[in-house]
Amino acid sequence: MKINRAELKERSRDLIARSKPKVLPAGLIYILLALVMYLLSSRLLGINYTDTLSQLYTQYLENGNVEYALAVAARMAPPFYAVVLSWLTDFLTYVVGAGFIIFLLNTIRRSGASYGNLLDAFPLFFKIFLLSLLTSVFTFLWSLLLIFPGVIASYRYRQALYVLLDHPEKSPLQCIRESKELMKGHKWELFVLDLSFIGWSLLASIPYVGYIIQIWTVPYISLSYAMYYEKLSGGDIYAADSGDELPPPPIDY
């Protein structure tokens, strides 16, 4: 089964325009939460950093005093608790992102999407953590062979989180195995879909302006990937049109 990339993107734009509750505000809430978590994480990692210590480190290094430079670097390093809290805030962002996926899947299926879905992944916190850990370890082990097997492995596991959010009763290993089955014959297809978003990603990376662009790109790209999973798993990406929650599409005279 070949998945039509253009159809997914068109359907994503259609749902963004017509779905209720709106996808863009949900994406904005997610972006703001992620931004707050990022700032908190950066603050924790820079807890001991000062311009004075930075200048002192540079001065010692330029003068060849490596031992003194390392001592200053050790003073600038964040304490262990700050590193742990930073990791935790980063993972909380990931869990909220999983909740955003739940919102998008509910939007596609017209199955009770609400902004509260952003918090619906927290009951799966430990399963999501274990899934993330396992996929990272497996991908790393494949990467030890060569970069290319590692890239293939990363695509093999791309649907594992969607499977877990769709079937919370399954174990992380079951989700990984099911993702491998779903991705058979579709890795290149998903790679091409990734490439098709490069332009948007570059625009979103522009300093300051990129934050505004992300209000569109994050929901649009995320919804397209959720649509891809829905199609891959045998779902109907037009299920939302069967109810009354969406206004009819515009008539092209």
Image (cartoon, rainbow, N blue to C red):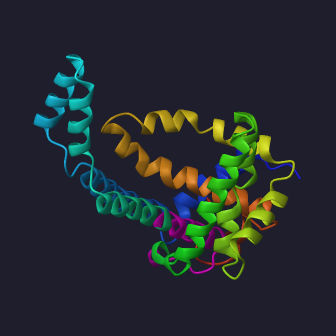
Instruction: Please report the residue visible at 68 percent of the width from the left and 74 percent of the height from the top.
Output: 166
Tell me which segment is drawn in magenta: 96-116
Q: Residue furthest front?
A: 67
Please state which of residues 69 and 253 is positioned toward the viewer in this rendering: 69
State which quadrant residue 131 falls in: bottom right
User: In screen coordinates, is 56 left or right of 111?
Assistant: left
Residue 35, image x, y percentages:
33, 55
Q: Is residue 212 left or right of residue 175?
A: left
User: Where is residue 104 drawn, in percent x and y?
Assistant: 58, 66
Q: Position of residue 30 (x, y in %)?
A: 41, 62
Q: Residue at x 66, y 66 (%)?
A: 162
The answer to whether one can see residue 138 in this image is yes
Q: How many marks?
A: 0
Nearer to us in this view, 12 or 105: 105
Residue at 69% from the left image edge and 70% from the top image edge:
172
- Decide whether residue 102 is among the magenta residues: yes
Image location (x, y in percent) of residue 1: 89, 53
Write down the quadrant of residue 235 in the picture. bottom right
Check residue 3 for magenta coloring: no
Taking depth in this image into account, of 114 and 41 the one nearest to the observer is: 41
